[in-house]
Structure formats: structure tokens, C-alpha cells
Image (spheres, rainbow, N blue to C red):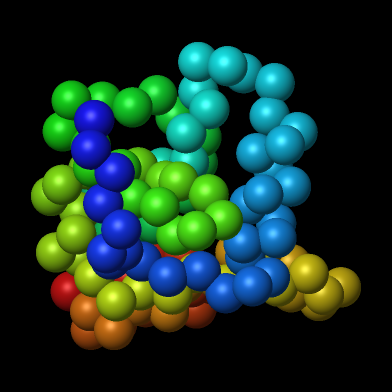
């Protein structure tokens, strides 16, 4: 599959560091690709997907310079221009998503509406 260098999604330095750490500690050789995407559900209508998965036929491969990730071609519409960040503090720990396409988001920031 062809790797695309123009990314619809960007990652902050802290997100890149955490993702690289997770890739290095991954023990499942089949599900070794980082998937970025969306799925229906959540309190605002759509939920972000950030997980390790197998590459599928409809996926595009992107390379941000630190690692590669996969995304279903149809998800670009919802995620174009999104920034993924990692917060490692005591009160707020985890990945956060800044999506310019979201018309509203839930309080926890893991779901959105367009």
C-alpha cells in the first residue's frame, strides 16, 4: 500500500512520544498499526478512535516522520486538520483531540458532532 505524506491529522510532540512508547511496547504483531478514525456513538454522536489494529482494504497509510498510522479513507472528512495531544498530568491524563470540524463536543472531549 502507498504511504501518503500529507497528513489529515497532526500530533503534538507529547502525543508522538507517547505513541512511539506504545508502539515499542506492543506485543501483538498482527495489530501493529496505529489506527486513527471515528465511529458512531458517544454522547455527541461520534467517538474518536485511536487504537492498534490490522490494516484493511479501505485504509490509507500516513507517515508523520515519527511513525506511520492508518485511517479509513472515508474518515478524512471528519478528521481533516485535527490535532492529537497527550496530557500526562495527575488530573488530566490521556489523549485529547482538537478537531476544527466538530460543531460541538462532549465534556470529556472524546466524542463530537459535525
Counting every numbered tag in the picture gives: 0
Q: x%, y% of residue 48?
A: 39, 57
- Closest to the observer: 24 or 50? 24
Q: Identify the residue shown where x is 53% and y is 27%.
A: 32
Q: Quadrant of the N terminus?
A: top left
Q: Is residue 69 left or right of residue 90?
A: left
Q: Is residue 44 visible?
A: no
- Closest to the observer: 87 or 7? 7
Q: Identify the residue shown where x is 50% and y is 78%.
A: 107
Question: From what the image shows, is residue 52 above or below residue 103?
Answer: above
Q: x%, y% of residue 2?
A: 23, 38
Q: Is residue 28 left or right of residue 97?
A: right
Q: Identify the residue shown where x is 62% and y is 18%.
A: 28
Q: Is residue 114 visible?
A: yes
Question: From what the image shows, is residue 33 above or below residue 35?
Answer: above
Q: x%, y% of residue 33?
A: 47, 34
Q: Quadrant of the C terminus?
A: bottom left
Q: Identify the residue shown where x is 35% and y is 74%.
A: 82
Q: Quadrant location of residue 22? A: top right
Q: Quadrant location of residue 13? A: bottom right
Question: From what the image shows, is residue 104 above or below residue 114?
Answer: below
Q: Quadrant location of residue 112? A: bottom left
Q: x%, y% of residue 45?
A: 26, 62
Question: From what the image shows, is residue 19 above or below residue 97?
Answer: above
Amino acid at each position: 500500500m502507498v504511504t501518503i505524506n500529507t497528513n489529515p491529522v497532526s500530533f503534538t510532540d507529547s502525543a508522538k512520544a507517547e505513541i512511539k512508547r506504545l508502539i515499542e511496547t506492543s506485543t501483538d504483531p498482527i495489530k501493529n498499526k496505529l489506527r486513527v478514525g471515528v465511529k458512531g456513538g458517544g454522547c455527541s454522536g461520534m467517538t474518536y478512535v485511536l487504537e492498534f489494529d490490522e490494516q484493511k482494504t479501505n485504509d490509507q497509510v500516513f507517515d508523520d516522520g515519527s511513525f506511520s498510522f492508518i485511517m479509513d479513507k472515508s474518515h478524512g472528512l471528519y478528521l481533516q486538520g485535527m490535532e492529537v495531544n497527550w496530557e500526562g498530568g495527575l488530573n488530566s491524563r490521556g489523549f485529547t483531540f482538537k478537531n476544527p470540524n466538530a460543531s460541538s463536543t462532549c465534556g470529556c472531549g472524546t466524542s463530537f458532532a459535525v
